[in-house]
Image (cartoon, grey):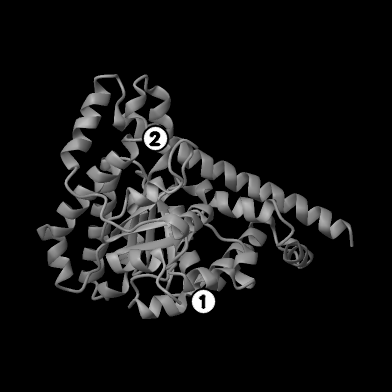
Amino acid sequence: MSQTTLHQLADFGQSAWLDYIDRPLLVTGKLQKLIDQGLRGMTSNPSIFNNAISNSTDYDKKIAELKTTGKSTFEIYDELTIKDIQDACDIFAPVFEKTSRLDGYVSLEINPQIANNTEASIREGKRLFIKVDRPNVMIKVPATEAGFPVIEELIASEMNVNVTLIFSLEQYVKTAEAYFRGLKRLEEAGGELSEVRSVASVFVSRVDTLIDKMLTDKSLQGRAAVANCKIIFEKFKELFQGGQFQALAKNKANVQRVLWGSTSIKNPEYSDIKYVAELIAAPTVNTIPEATLHAFLDHGKVKEALTGKFIDAQKLFTQLRGMNIDIDAVCAQLLTEGVAAFDKACVALFDAIEKKAAQLTAAK
C-alpha cells in the first residue's frame, strides 16, 4: 500500500489513534483496513461504549446469553467491554510489536462512577488490567485529585496508563509528576521501567466551544484550544528534558507522550481537520474520531504545527483575561462537566443493558 497521510504522520513523530470502538469495527475487517492505512492505536470511553451498545443490536445476542447465565448488569457490561478491548488489542498486536511497544495500545476507562474514590479506582484499575490480560492495554484514569494517586499506583505496579480529561496546565503538571513518582517507586522495587507506557490526554475542542461563546471579538474565536495545547506542550518538553525524568531515563523509562483528545470540530465554520492539522508535533499522539480520521486521510497535510508560537499563546490568554475570560476557570468547569458527562454515559449504558436484558430474555 502506498504511503497515506497517517503513515507520513507516524514518520514525522505523531501517532494517529482512533477515538472509537464497536463490535462491527472489530469483526468486519474495517479496523485492520485502517491499520493498513497507518492507524496505530485506539481509545474508548463510557460515551463511546454507550453509543455502541445502547444504539445498536450488535451486542444483543451476547447480552441475552449473559443474562440467562445469571450475570448482573455490571457483569454484562464488564464482559462486553472487556471482550471488545481484548479483540482490539489482538488486532493491534502486530503494531505493538513492530513499533517496539510505542504504539498498538487500546484504552479502557475505569468505571467513572467510582472516579472520586481513590482506593476503589486503584482496585478496579488493577482488576481491569489483569482481566484484559493483554500487554497493549492502557487503563484510563481521570486527571483529578482523586485520580493522581491512582495513576502513580498503577504505574508503580507496572501497568500502562492513559491519563484522561486533562484541560489545564496544572492538571498536566500533576499528571507528569504522578508518572514520575510511579516510575521511581517501580525503579526502587526493581521493576522494568521500559515495560511501562503512558500518555497524557489533553482535551482540545471543548475549550474553544466554551470560550467562543464568551467572545464578542469574533477574530479570537477558535484560537484558545490550540494555544492551551501549545503551552502544555512546552511544559512537556521542559519536564521531560529535566533532571527528574532524565535520571529515570537512564534506567530505560519511557517518555509519557502528550495525546490530543476531543479533536472533532464542534463549529461547522472550522476546518474539519482543524484539531489534527494544527496540533502536529513530535513526539505526540492524536486520538481522532472516525469521520475526522477519514477527512485527514483525504485532504490532510503533514507539517510541524506547534513550533515558535509559545509567546503568542501566552499573549492570547493575557488578552482573554482582559475580557474577564480566565483559562483556569474555563478548564476547571470543563473538567467538572467532563467527569459528570462520563458518569452520565455510564449510567445510561447500564440502564440500556438492563432494559435490553429484560426484553431479550422475556421474548424467549
Q: Identify whether 70 is placed above or below 215.
A: below
Left or right of 138 in this view: 348 = right
The numbered dot on residue 340 is none
Nearer the observer, 199 or 127: 199
Question: Which one is nearer the viewer's eye here, 60 or 193?
Answer: 60
The residue to which callout 1 is attached is 90
Looking at the rendered image, the disc whose residue lies closer to the viewer, 2 or 1, is 2
- Mark 1: secondary structure: helix
Q: Furthest-left residue in view?
A: 243
What residue does disc 2 label?
A: 208
Which residue occupies the foreground of this view, 73 or 174? 174
What is the quadrant of residue 140 in the picture?
Answer: bottom left
x then y, percent, for residue 362? 87, 56
Quarter in which the C terminus is drawn: bottom right
Marks 2 & 1, CB-CB < 8 Å contact:
no
Among the 4 quarters of the image, the one containing residue 363: bottom right
Residue 1 location (% of width, % of height): 46, 77
**Disc 2 crowd, CA 10 A, few/some/many (<14, 14-19, 20+):** many
Instruction: Please give the name of the residue rendered at 56% of the width and 73% of the height, measured from the top-left corner.
Output: 87
